[in-house]
Image: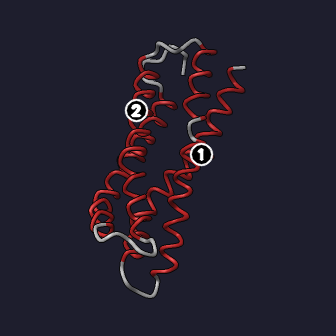
Amino acid sequence: MAKLLLSLHVLAAILFIGPVAVAVSMFPARAKVALAAGPDQASAAASVRLLHRITQVYAMLGIAVPVIGIGTAQVMGIMNQTWLIVATVLTALAAAVLLLLVNPAQQAVIDALGDEPPADGLARATGGLRRLPMTAGVFNLLWAVVTVMMVVRPGSTTGA
């Protein structure tokens, strides 16, 4: 059972977190083009909307990763391992960064791209856009650290 759950956990991480990481990383550059006047503005706006949708949908699907991970850890009897607790906290931090920083900044850009954006919409969007590459980087860095911890398992007693 542990091998099945571990396989599902890894597969879910690849299929659900990978697209979020890519979409979050691509969004700021495309958003800059979409918010600026130019020949590529229309296609950039469409890609920004798509990247935001990918971020939202795959983030919801990504909830399966920690859920399956907790189930796997329970079956393996390693819930009290320090490395696992730290990885769980980092996963929660990554989710918080996505929910509280990345998603609202992306939404501000989407709102500013509307047919009749509010007067302060563009200012809000560009303000959030300045921080978006950094928050996207923090999100991806947290997931990279969690991934390394899952492979290396420092202090683990499971023999890896």
Residue 54 location in percent, x, y?
56, 56
**Which quarter of the rendering shows the C terminus?**
top right
Q: The residue tagged with tag 2: helix, strand or loop?
A: helix
Percent position of residue 119, x then y: 29, 71
The count of marks equals 2
Any mark on residue 43, and which? none
Q: Amino acid at mark 1?
A: Phe
Q: Earlier in the sequence, mark 1 or mark 2?
A: 1
Q: Position of residue 125 (x, y in %)?
A: 33, 64
Structural crowding at the residue carrying mark 1, measured as other residues with C-alpha within 10 Å and reported as few (<14), some (14–19) or many (≥20): many
Q: Nearer the viewer, residue 132 or 123?
A: 123
Residue kind at label 2, given as amino acid type: Leu
Relative height, residue 78 to residue 127 (above, below): above
Q: Is residue 12 left or right of residue 21?
A: right
- Furthest-bottom residue in this view: 39
Local crowd at mark 2 within 10 Å, few (<14), some, or many (≥20)? Answer: some
Residue holding disc 1 = 16
Q: Is residue 148 left or right of residue 7?
A: left
Within the image, what quadrant is residue 38 found in? bottom left
| Cβ atoms at labels 1 and 2 below 8 Å apart | no
Q: Which residue is mark 2?
A: 90
Q: Above or below — where is 67 with respect to 97?
A: above
- How far apart in space, not on screen, are marks 1 and 2 (Cα)? 17 Å
Q: Secondary structure at mark 1?
A: helix
